[in-house]
Amino acid sequence: MSKKELLNIENLAINYITDDGTVKAVNGIDIKLDKGETLGLVGETGAGKTTTALGIMRLVPNPPGKIIEGKIEFEGRDLLEVEEEEMRMIRGNKISMIFQDPMTSLNPVMTVGEQISEVIEIHQDLNRQDAMKKAEEMLELVGISKTRSNNYPHQFSGGMKQRVIIAISLACNPQLLIADEPTTALDVTIQAQVLDLMNDLKEEFHTAMILITHDLGVVSEVCDKVAIMYAGEIIESATLKQLFENPKHPYTLGLFGSIPNLEEESHRLKPIKGLMPDPTNLPTGCKFHPRCPYGTDLCSKQHPKAIEIEEGHRVKCLIYEGLVDAEVKK
Amino acid sequence: MHKYIFKRLLLLIPVLLGVTFIVFTIMSFTPGDPAQLILGESAPPEKVEELRAEMGLDDPFLVQYFRFVGNALRGDFGRSYRTKREVFAEIFARFPNTLILTIVAIAIAVAIGIPVGIISATKQYSLMDSISMVGALLGVSMPNFWLGLMLILAFSVGLGWLPFAGFEGASSIILPAITLGTGAAAIITRMTRSSMLEVIRQDYIRTARAKGVAEKKVVNKHALKNALIPVITVVGLQFGYLLGGAVLTETVFSWPGVGRLLVEAIKQKDTPTVLASVVFMATTFSFVNLLVDILYAYVDPRIKSQYSK
């Protein structure tokens, strides 16, 4: 393991075991992340992005969720092995998380100052007053006047709430920040502000980040690396440049193809045909084959392996294993 | 906030007018002649007529009602037909007994209901949860008087630990308070459980966990305060309900409270006592409700900001 490496996830699998069947949310994913690096985790709703994030925090609701296998190495230690008490000291401190919906992610009966200072009090050796002072500094840092630390969440707008959440998540200078669709619930203009803020703070604190999103535009602005998730698997991972200039997997191409083009005259959007498979009943072989324009019989039988086609660019598709003959184009 | 409280107090006026009007109507149009009741079965009809005229019972119904309201506004609720004593004095003599019984009962109910509800919710589907839910079901289903009698049988007659009736010293309150509080405890348990179950799934609870807050603190600080809002409503309603509904318990334990006074007054058509008791209970009930609403503001800042509008 190199000195720069911060996070190394290998073969992580997470299931939700319910009465209606087992939901295979995450199926053997590998993620590597260096210090200060930003990874974009992209995929449709239900691809397993949030579950992956919760898995890293060890916050997958159990029951029904269960981490079946794999390892999550963080700073050289497997998080799946550490005691709960120790894990608690990592959460909010070394790894913190920003959730999708700022409207519901803050406790309505606590002031925002209390909610920020709480995380500082837990993880840093500060008394209540000092923690509150630091919390006020954090508020200023995210662009909210410290005079508002006595206010309650309902007195803030959605964008400001998300700023408060960012303040909470960065209060203890985490090594890793997991942002789960941090801008999805916000207006487009506010999205840009929040993204800029996150970007600036990330640089300032040298924080590595996993940005979960389904917006490739956001990825192109913020990320160094990208991993595309489909049905609980990472089907393609590459650097930002590689992925945007030379996407390989038919699904990734489909994603790019579905972005409307400003220069081209078109009357209809071009979605990827079909729907995400039912996670309780995933297709055999390659999970994308029922929707894939190049799908063959073999695709429905053989599960593709991850192939490294150039350094740092891995793709899971039988075409690149040389087993299916097709020319993939944009 | 002060404006809100003032508004609520003003609202008490139509409530009391409505309540007294309904009770007055019922008392006026149900059979039985108060004059006859006062003078006894064997009184000569002329005497009864005379007294009726004197009491103004021959006046039109509305005239009688507004005379009552006018007198009540001056604090004069009249004298009991039975005991000839001032009704308010009589109620005041008994009300503290009912109040103490109710407070102890609701305290027992809260002390049992909230912790059991929390444990039930945090350990959903566990053995502990099943036991407390069956217990809660029994609690709401058992009739008060039956439970009271069983408790007397066990602890007074059988074991001889506690007095079985009356009002002698602190120990005599235990059995009636348990009897009265059991139903409320069951309801509060169920309410706390369901409210807690809802809150514990909220996003902000996940946020708290993601901050590294210890699970105990997640439950007792982050979740509980949110979960308490509906529980406070139920506690307030139960308190008012127990206050007025302690009749059976008071009867079983010969507890000298307002509930028993009211029932006896109804039986003997003692209109002034009935009206005064009802006014008293309605007022107390309204005050308890107001208190609950004020409490909300302290628990939930969103409600507080609404009050100040």
Image (cartoon, rainbow, N blue to C red):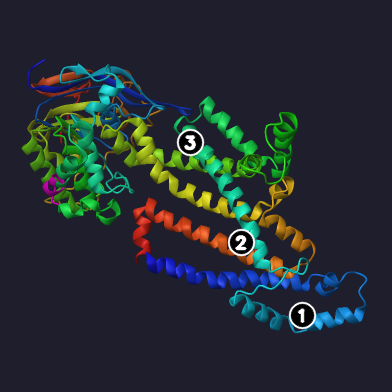
Q: Which residues are magenta?
A: A137-144
For marks 2 and 3, give the one nearer the viewer: 2
Please give the residue where the numbered disc 2 appears in the rendered image: B281
Q: Chain of mark 3?
A: B
Give the amino acid type for the residue marked by disc 3 in the picture. Answer: Pro
Choose the circle earlier in sequence order: 2 or 3.
3
Residue B126 or B40: which is nearer the viewer? B40
Left or right? Give the position of A293 relative to B116.
left
Q: Chain of mark 2?
A: B
Task: State which quarter of the image contains the C terminus of chain A.
Answer: top left
A139 inside magenta stretch: yes
Whether residue A146 is situated above or below residue A18 in the rendered picture: below
Choose the circle earlier in sequence order: 3 or 1.
1
- Residue A167 in which image quadrant: top left
x and y percent of residue A181 in the render?
A: 23, 41
A38 inside magenta stretch: no
Residue A110, can we see it?
Answer: yes
Kindly report the distance in space between the C-alpha atoms of the residues bearing marks 3 and 1.
Answer: 55 Å
Left or right? Give the position of A317 relative to B44.
left
Which residue lies at the image location 44% right of the left edge and 32% below the top edge? B122
x and y percent of residue B211 in the render?
A: 25, 35
Kindly report the distance in space between the C-alpha atoms of the residues bearing marks 2 and 1.
Answer: 26 Å
Q: Which mark is residue A315?
A: none
Please give the residue where the numbered disc 1 appears in the rendered image: B55
Residue B90 or A303: which is nearer the viewer? B90
Q: Secondary structure at mark 3?
A: helix
